């Protein structure tokens, strides 16, 4: 039917189109499933999968997704997002404002490394699909990275932990799920090969971190890189909520990033008189 022949209501109803949710008085369907049929039968990770992917996952797929989400919930107030949530709470804002303030800083540097890592893995996987062996695909991608790109190889190293205690366990569990046929294990192999090749080039091991390890799981489960960042935000929101709530129960007011007896380093002009001031 042409737009000219549609009624005003039909046009209004088509203004937003979605395959995710259907709702009218007395009815809620998510991806075609009645909400009452999902409640009590579908876990939160499975609900995330359904909303993003359109189909229900297997129990094992939901379990592995839940493992990745649970691993990255918090890293303490030294993480900018957590510190910001706590500072915002001392300013008297609501818990939603404190959470929003924190989530808004989860960008390319703080929160985006998982997306970058999965994109990196994906480049290697694509080369392997074209017939390049794993080791050579990793070498070629790293050659390009060191020649053209700046910064750190995504998914490796941690500014605080010599070995990120979360990463080895996540890879171990990924390989357990791969051994049962839940996932293929390809991205775990890619991450391991990257770690080994970087160690060979630098003469020391730079271990996989939480971003690289969760990217392995999200890749194994078939999530595209861009969603990896969103999944990290969902995960870290748990820690943000906990810290914002805890801080809101304390008496601190206007708590800044440093104790008030410690001031910042001033690097501007020295003290000077106002122009034409004779005194």
Image (tube, rainbow, N blue to C red):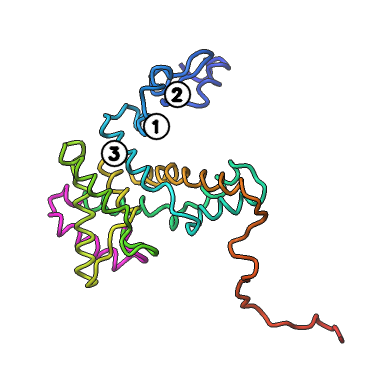
> Relative to residue 189, is residue 177 depicted above or below?
above
Stretch of the chain drawn in magenta: 126-155
Query: Would you say residue 149 sits in the magenta stretch?
Result: yes
Where residue 44 is drawn, which disc sits there? Answer: 1
The residue located at (29%, 67%) in the rendering is: 146
Disc number lying in front (2 or 1): 1
Give the prevailing secondary structure in the magenta stretch.
helix
Q: Say how many tags the image has.
A: 3
Q: Mark 3 points at which residue?
A: 64
Nearer to the camera, 57 or 42: 42
Residue 183 position, x and y percent, is 21, 39
Residue 20 position, x and y percent, is 42, 26
Using the numbered discs, state the Cα–Cα distance from disc 3 to disc 2 in whole angstroms.
25 Å
- Please identify the residue farthest to the top as the structure is shown: 26
- Please identify the residue farthest to the front as the structure is shown: 250
| Residues at discs 3 and 2 in contact (Cβ within 8 Å) | no
Using the numbered discs, state the Cα–Cα distance from disc 2 to disc 1 in whole angstroms.
17 Å
Q: Mark 2 points at which residue?
A: 21
Tag 3 secondary structure: helix
Tag 2 secondary structure: strand
Nearer to the camera, 17 or 10: 17
Nearer to the camera, 132 or 37: 37
**Chain-order first, disc 1 or disc 3:** 1
């Amino acid at each position: 039917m042409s737009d000219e022949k549609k009624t005003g209501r039909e046009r209004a109803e088509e203004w937003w189109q979605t395959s995710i949710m259907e709702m009218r008085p007395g009815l809620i369907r998510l991806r075609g499933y009645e909400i009452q049929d999902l409640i009590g039968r579908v876990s939160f990770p499975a609900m995330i999968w359904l909303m993003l992917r359109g189909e229900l996952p297997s129990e094992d797929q939901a379990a592995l997704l839940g493992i990745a989400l649970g691993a990255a919930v918090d890293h303490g107030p030294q993480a900018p997002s957590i510190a910001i949530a706590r500072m915002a709470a001392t300013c008297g804002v609501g818990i939603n404002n404190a959470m929003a303030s924190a989530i808004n800083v989860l960008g390319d540097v703080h929160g985006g490394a998982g997306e970058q890592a999965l994109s990196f893995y994906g480049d290697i996987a694509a080369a392997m699909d074209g017939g390049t062996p794993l080791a050579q695909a990793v070498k070629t991608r790293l050659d390009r990275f060191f020649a053209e790109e700046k910064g750190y190889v995504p998914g490796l190293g941690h500014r605080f932990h010599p070995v990120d205690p979360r990463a080895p366990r996540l890879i171990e569990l990924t390989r357990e799920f791969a051994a049962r046929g839940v996932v293929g294990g390809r991205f775990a192999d890619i991450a391991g090969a990257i770690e080994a090749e970087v160690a060979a080039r630098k003469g020391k091991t730079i271990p996989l971190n939480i971003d690289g390890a969760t990217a392995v799981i999200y890749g194994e489960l078939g999530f595209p890189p861009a969603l990896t960042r969103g999944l990290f935000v969902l995960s870290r929101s748990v820690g943000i909520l906990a810290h914002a709530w805890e801080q809101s129960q304390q008496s601190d007011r206007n708590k800044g990033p440093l104790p008030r007896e410690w001031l910042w380093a001033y690097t501007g002009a020295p003290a000077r008189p106002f122009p034409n001031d004779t005194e």
